[in-house]
Image (tube, coloured by chain):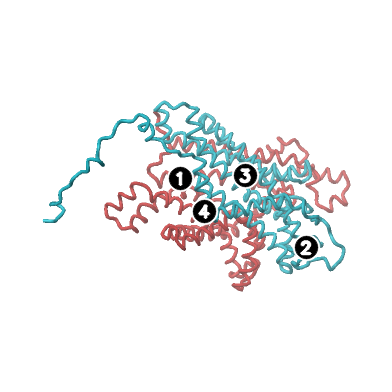
Chain colours: A cyan, B red
Amino acid sequence: MSQQNEKKITLDPVKFRAAVFDHMRSEDTGYSNYSYWKSTFRTFFKSKAVCALVILICGIILMSFLYPVFSDVDPTKRSLIFMDWNQKPSETHWFGTDQLGRDIWARAWYGARNSFLLGFCIALSDVGIGMIVGALWGYNRKMDPVMIELYNVMTNIPSTVYLVLLAYIMNTSFLTLFISMASRGWIVEARFFRNRILSIRDSEYNIASKCLGTSMWKIVTKNIIPHIISLIIMEAALCIPYSIGSEVFLGFVGVGMPVDAITLGNIVNQGRASFTQHPYQMLLPAAILCIITIAFYIIGNKFADASDPRNHV
Amino acid sequence: MAKYIGKRALRSLLTVSIVFVAVFMLLRFMPLEGYFSDEMIKEADEATRMSYLRNLGLLDHPLVQLGRFVKNLFQGELGRSLTVYPKVPILTLLKEKIPVTAAFGLVSMILGIVFGLSLGLIMVKSQNHFGDHMGNMFILVIRAVPSILYLFVIQVYVSAWLDVPMLFYDNRPNSWILPAISLSLGSVAWYALWLRRFMVDEQNQDYVKFAQVKGLSRSAVQRKHIFRNAIIPLVIYLPSDLLLIISGSLVIETLYSIPGTGGLLTTAIKNQDNNLVQILVLMYAVLSVLGVFLGDLLIAFVDPRIKLTQKED
């Protein structure tokens, strides 16, 4: 026989007494001071790498917009002196100069600013229009046949057609690039949001909430919007690398911004032409471009993870 | 089932027709000067130019042109290229170019599936360890960095490192390796990313815990339960991928100067080669609509839980 069975268990009457019913404390039990946004940001900033990336990207954005303020280097200034062409990176020209003697460091920052502007505009229109259309689409199943048809048609028309056509009507510019890129982005986003809203709307917790008599308004604001807002931020963040990549691609194809416009796409594509002799002309601006796209990609994905309530503790 | 297929076929026909008519009409908005070659602009007078356009039927009402095009199409006459490859029959052009692109596409698709799924499996097995981190790095670079940049760097540095030619030669098989691998990188990353995500999702399901409780080994659960369920959402894209391999990759075919279909559509749009654009858009639209349709059929075949025809309730 083991000793445990022989041990007598005595309850300390001081420690074990019946609780007195307290109305105030009984209300307390189901309450936790959970706040969706606080938890999201706490989870998001828990990782030091993410903090560093956010600081880095804020720095790059500030730098690209403020560069013209504290530097008077003209990114379009060509040099007629042979010695100024194709200079290697040095103290005066941090990224060297290109074949026309233009300072690549200055061009990279002006280009980054234009790429950011394009990216922000695309993000705003794609995600903004896509979200509104997607919300209506998700709530109105009657729109399904028309919208699916529209989606199939829009995604099958090559966007180069709009781009070339617009380039004839008005000159190729920021606007034509924006229109042709935004022309199909919104419906892709709309379909994404529609699928999400549909699955959230019909998920068990919402049906349960509806059965318990929660008002429509409360379901939308408390149960659906938090999920959608995180997706909106994620999609907007992912729009930046996408639009920068598209701009580089269009420049490569030869239907992008005019050659004298300063964009990251143009700088990289021009650097590619002289890559064998002067690799730094492409690699250094491309490094800035990659830092921007990779940082936004990571931030977008990490934010999506952090905003998922299942990851909150 | 037959009713479902019939309905889908009709709707697909509608989609393709709308896409085609839209592109056809958009092309008619292009300026007439775009149809002339450079020497024609310099040398020919107004009357010659007009008779040139009249001979091509470009001065007729767009609807007349559309009718003529459709009539010719049903007689098996695809027409001739206007500006990109002047007077070459489009059928000859496609017969020449599609096999090259399709061969590369097929090889890279197989590489993509084999290596993508293997990478995904490795990442799941070593979750949050070295293999997983390396895989994530790879996916991050491929998806966030504009493809032109890494493809160009691969072309320049890896070809020197492996001592293979930088351009494509149809009589030197060692010049085919790099383009095929480059072409598969995107799909390797795509398959690895989604297989990993879906498998991680499936791992937390109750049936997996049940299978483990029953005493199945870890690898048997992985293989028989998790993998099979995780692969289902990926299967739906297989038919589209397979059919659209003939559209090729613009960037890779331009970089390695492969005589395929990759840049054909964009070049044709830029040069206002109406006939070529119309045929290509029609072809790609039919294939992509067909691909989606086959994907839906395939997923119903693979996953018995999915029913294509909705129950009447």
Residue at disc 1, secondary structure:
loop
Question: How much space separates mark 4 and mark 2, taking CA atoms?
Answer: 40 Å
A44 on left or right of A19: right
What is the chain identity of the residue bearing mark 3?
A: B
What amino acid is labelled 3 in the image?
A: Leu
Q: Element at badge 4?
A: loop
**Which label lies toward us, 1 or 3?**
1
Q: Earlier in the sequence, mark 2 or mark 1?
A: 2
Which circle, 3 or 4, is nearer the viewer?
4
Mark 3: few/some/many CA within 10 Å (<14, 14-19, 20+):
many
**Residue A308 point in image, percent of width and height:** 48, 44
Judging by the rendered image, the residue that carries numbered circle 4 is: A47
Q: Which residue is mark 1?
A: A312
On the picture, is B4 further left or further right than B148? Answer: left
Which residue position holds label 2? A98
Q: Please tell me if label 4 and label 2 are on a single chain.
A: yes
Q: Give the residue drawn at x 67%, y 41%.
A: B23
Which chain is mark 4 on?
A
